[in-house]
Image: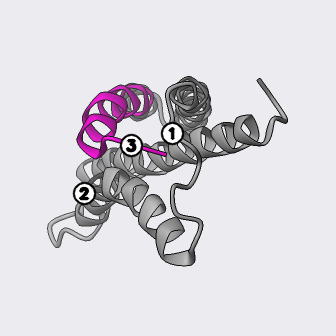
Amino acid sequence: MSLDVSRRFLDDGTVLVTILGFWAAVGFLFPPVGQSFATNAGTVMALLYAAIRGVALAEHAAPAYSDPTPKGVLGDNATALFAAGPWLLVAWLVVNLPWVHGEYVGQFLRLVAFAFGWTGVAIVVTYAVGIGVAALRDLGTIE
């Protein structure tokens, strides 16, 4: 599947981080019950967006794997990692910053890391759904 890494990172990533960031902010304003509800709602919405976006991308995708060898499959899947990697890296950096302490600062930064981390996961879901739908289309299972 041809995937423009910079486009997936910027276009899909900004939408996903906005969805997750909004719900993380709502959760920060209404702890502890609101935080759990809001982060769960944000995760579900982001993953639904990712799945629908993956189906839309499959319409314009090339054949699922241009090179069916293990090297080709890993190479095709590496593009999803390059699109999701920066979001996951930022989430890891936010969590592991040495100055993350204190009740409110720590809680806020954990929610920021939540938004960035799930954005990376949702980008991978977008790619996986796109690949799956394109593969099923190529096999003639779906039209």
> Element at badge 1?
loop
Q: Pointer 3 and pointer 2: residues touching (CB < 8 Å)?
A: no
Classify mark 3: helix, strand or loop.
loop
Q: Is residue 6 above or below residue 113?
A: above
Q: Spatial distance from mark 3 to mark 2, Cα to Cα?
A: 22 Å
Q: Amino acid at mark 1?
A: Ala
Q: Is residue 133 magenta?
A: no
* Residue at image mark 1: 62
Is residue 58 left or right of 76 when viewed as pictured?
A: right
Above or below for 100 versus 47: below
Q: Nearer the N terminus, badge 3 or badge 2?
A: 3
Residues 42 and 139: in front is 139
Q: Nearer the viewer, mark 3 or mark 2?
A: 3
Measuring 50% from the left and 27% from the top, which residue is drawn there? 60
Q: Identify residue for label 3.
A: 3
Q: Nearer the viewer, mark 1 or mark 3?
A: 1
Q: Nearer the viewer, mark 1 or mark 2?
A: 1
Task: Give the Cα separation between the discs numbered 1 and 3.
Answer: 9 Å
Tell me the element at label 2: helix
Q: Residue at x 41, y 50 (%)?
A: 120
Residue 111: percent from the left, percent from the top?
A: 37, 45
Closer-to-camera residue (139/12): 139
Give the prevailing secondary structure in the magenta stretch.
helix
Q: Which residues are magenta?
A: 1-23
Residue extending farthest to the right is 141
Amino acid type of the residue tagged 2 in the rendering: Val
Q: Is residue 114 left or right of residue 5?
A: right
Identify the residue under disc 2. Answer: 90
User: Which residue shows up at 60% across the image and 45% down it?
Assistant: 131
